[in-house]
Image (tube, helix red, strand yellow):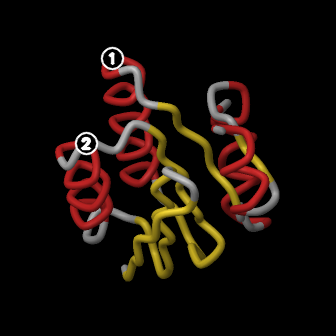
Amino acid sequence: MQHTSTDRDGVTVLAFSGRMDATTVAAFDEAWRARLEAGANRLVIDMGGIEYISSAGLRGILGLLKACKSGGVGLAFCGIGEMVGEVFRISGFTGMLSIHPTADAAVAALA
């Protein structure tokens, strides 16, 4: 899994690509934890490059969601592809997450 981090109007945007599974979820966790520890209070997760997500990946997202809720951090997701979107729908994640079509829309939602 690869990721990049950018700052847009005070919102940290983490863009991920590759597979999100048991072997890569640690990199996902490390990336968002580092941003929260650095003081990010608004976070966008761009999943446009994620081609596959497993149950381990879903657990990683739950960990992020819990950390953001307990820390008062604004969180939004964007760029959800068809396969990941279907997994989110089946698992009930669409009702728990703020999901937007683009990073710009997600950043605007957190502004």
What amino acid type should be assigned to the residue bearing mark 1?
Ser
Mark 2: few, some, or many residues within 10 Å (few <14, many ≥20)?
A: few
Residue name at image x 48 percent, y 72 percent = 16
Distance, label 2 to label 1, CA atoms, is: 14 Å
Classed neighbour count for the residue bearing mark 1: other residues with Cα under 10 Å, few (<14), some (14–19), many (≥20):
few
The image position of residue 51, as x and y in percent, is: 60, 77
Q: Position of residue 43 (x, y in %)?
A: 48, 47
Relative to 7, say whether 107 is above or below.
above
Q: As drawn, is 73 to the left or to the right of 90?
A: left
Residue situated in front as seen by the camera: 79 or 13 = 13
Tell which circle, 2 or 1, labels the residue nearer the N-terminal end. 2
Is 101 drawn above or below residue 93 in the view shown? Answer: below
Residue type at numbered disc 2: Gly
- Residue drawn 63% across and 36% down? 91
Dot 1 corresponds to which residue?
Answer: 70
Question: Nearer the observer, disc 2 or disc 1?
Answer: 2
Q: Which residue is mark 2?
A: 39
The residue depicted at 56 percent of the width and 71 percent of the height is: 52
Quarter holding residue 61: top left
Res 50 quadrant in image: bottom right
